[in-house]
């Protein structure tokens, strides 16, 4: 029996207006290569970097949200290594004095979070390699955890939790597919009761949560097999191969001193809590919104919603906010508001419509009060669920309120008692057998007759009223 020990190193690109040390634009989606570049981020000799204060502030915010300690003294260091997408021949990073120390998320302790600059992007085609420096110099945070994680599920939970928090803070879009969030896992295994950790293997190139899970499972299996056979695990860096679902050896791990870290001579050290660079921690803390895990708990308690629906709502801050706005609109209309029904329409029907059109909640025409209004009509039997779905689709197209749509689209509910009475009379006359069944006490027969009225009115008859009139007629 082996005990796995896992630590994570997670990079995320920060969402600032400009790059980390120059005034080039930070546009991760830029498709034209090498347009957001200047002599500073291209590493021309004689140029000088300037610290982007917005990026440092985001780091402070992230640190506070993760219960970390903000360092008073922090500095940048040079990390020397050569790579074709790193034009200076070194990366400006932080070594001994990161901005954030300690902190935790979901039972995993965080060692540190530091700020550095991203490298460019290489693409290889046939006999040549191309380099795009748009990404070079973007502010990049690196978070390192303690080796507190013991299986793939915990690792995924940590990474997901971090992604949500970064998005809630507006600090990063953290889209793994776009490389805005990148994960490395340090994995070792040791026999139970060994008293010390095994040899650490670092796995890179992990580009999805599924890959985090699969790469860790694979490594645990590979290392266990080696130990079972009496062989040794080599300390090395391995890459995750998404196609073959295996890790492959890349290189024997460098030691920190191979990078020749030294304080960046072109940048002044920072005093974050005192002196001219000071940050008002109280103020930054007040800008942190309710975080996802807190929101999860509150949604369960306050609205009595099930776990899956809460999960869908909270995964996206904008969706959660939209839901709360609609729920409060519904509460204003009626004391007995059916928030569950509202959440259902939002997370299934409306979300389905958004998905087919590939639009986000910020882009849709429907307003929260309109969905609240729709649910209010359903709750009061003024609108059948069959009509409601069609109505929602129309609302999605036009952005109109359900009431005005009902009028203009002829989707108005039939609630004229006289007219309903006439239709009920016709249905009763045509369905002698069901009427007889009902009189014998068969409740199903009543449902059948309601259905007949619905069919005759193309689903427009107001359900509550229809049932009332039918019962009155049948019991005469
Ligand atoms: Zn630049």
Image: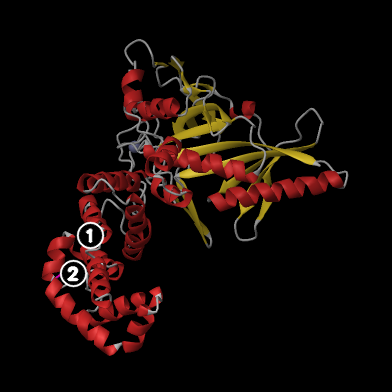
Q: Is residue 460 above or below residue 105?
A: below
- Asked if the magenta segment contains residue 92, the reply would be no
Which residue was labeled with disc 1? 377
- Number of numbered labels in the structure image: 2
Left or right: where 407 falls relative to 380: left
In the displayed structure, does residue 314 sit left or right of residue 407? right
Q: Position of residue 105 (x, y in %)?
A: 52, 32
Element under disc 1:
helix
Q: Quadrant of ligand 1?
A: top left
Examine the image and state in which quarter residue 72 appears. Answer: top left
Residue found at the far top of this picture: 275
Q: Say whether disc 1 or disc 2 marks the residue closer to the N-terminus.
A: 1
Residue at image location 31% in from the left, 48% down from the top: 323
Label 2, on which residue? Answer: 413
Q: Which mark is residue 82?
A: none
Task: Check the picture and name the quadrant holding the C terminus.
Answer: bottom left
Q: Which residues are magenta?
A: 412-416
From the top left corner, tell me how far across and down residue 223 is, in percent.
76, 45
Closer to us: 391 or 49: 391
Mark 1 → mark 2, Cα distance in angstroms = 10 Å
Reply above or below: 386 against 262.
below
Q: Position of residue 159 (x, y in %)?
A: 53, 41
Quadrant assignment, res 149: top right
Mark 1 touching mark 2, by CB under 8 A?
yes
Residue 122, placed above or below residue 411: above
Which one is nearer the viewer's eye here, 251 or 346?
Answer: 346
């Amino acid at each position: 029996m082996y005990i796995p020990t896992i630590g994570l190193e997670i990079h995320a690109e920060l969402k600032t207006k400009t790059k980390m040390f120059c005034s080039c634009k930070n546009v991760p989606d830029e498709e034209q290569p090498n347009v957001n570049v200047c002599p500073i981020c291209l590493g021309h000799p004689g140029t000088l970097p300037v610290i982007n204060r917005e990026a440092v502030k985001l780091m402070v915010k992230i640190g506070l949200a993760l219960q970390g300690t903000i360092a008073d003294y922090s500095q940048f260091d040079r990390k020397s290594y050569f790579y074709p997408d790193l034009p200076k021949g070194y990366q400006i990073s932080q070594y001994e004095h990161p901005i954030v120390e300690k902190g935790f998320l979901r039972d995993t302790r965080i060692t540190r979070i530091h700020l550095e600059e991203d490298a460019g992007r290489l693409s290889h085609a046939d006999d040549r390699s191309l380099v795009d420096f748009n990404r070079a110099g973007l502010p990049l945070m690196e978070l390192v955890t303690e080796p507190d994680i013991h299986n793939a599920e915990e690792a995924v939970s940590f990474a997901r939790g971090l992604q949500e928090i970064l998005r809630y803070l507006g600090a990063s879009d953290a889209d793994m597919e776009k490389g805005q969030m990148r994960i490395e896992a340090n994995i070792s295994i040791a026999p139970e009761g060994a008293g010390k950790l095994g040899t650490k293997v670092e796995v890179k190139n992990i580009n999805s949560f599924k890959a985090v899970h699969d790469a860790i499972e694979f490594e645990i299996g590979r290392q266990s097999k080696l130990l079972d056979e009496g062989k040794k695990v080599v300390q090395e860096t391995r890459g995750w191969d998404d196609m073959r679902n295996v890790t492959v050896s890349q290189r024997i791990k460098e030691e920190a001193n191979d990078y020749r870290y030294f304080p960046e001579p072109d940048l002044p050290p920072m005093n974050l809590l005192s002196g001219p660079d000071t940050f008002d921690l109280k103020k930054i803390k007040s800008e942190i919104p309710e975080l996802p895990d807190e929101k999860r708990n509150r949604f369960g308690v306050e609205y009595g919603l099930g776990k899956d629906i809460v999960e869908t709502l909270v995964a996206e801050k904008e969706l959660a906010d939209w839901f709360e706005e609609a729920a409060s609109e519904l509460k204003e209309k009626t004391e007995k508001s059916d928030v569950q029904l509202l959440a259902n329409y939002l997370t299934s029907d409306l979300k389905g419509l958004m998905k087919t059109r590939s639009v986000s909640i910020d882009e849709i025409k429907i307003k929260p009060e309109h969905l609240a209004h729709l649910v209010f009509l359903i709750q009061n039997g003024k609108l059948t669920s069959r009509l409601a779905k069609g109505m929602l689709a129309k609302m999605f197209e036009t952005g109109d309120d359900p009431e005005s749509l009902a009028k203009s689209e002829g989707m108005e509910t039939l609630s004229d008692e006289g007219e309903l009475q006439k239709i009920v009379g016709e249905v009763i006359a045509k369905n002698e057998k069901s009427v007889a069944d009902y009189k014998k006490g068969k409740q199903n027969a009543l449902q059948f007759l309601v259905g007949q009225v619905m069919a005759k009115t193309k689903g427009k008859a107001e359900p509550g009223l229809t049932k009332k009139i039918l019962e009155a007629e049948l019991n005469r």
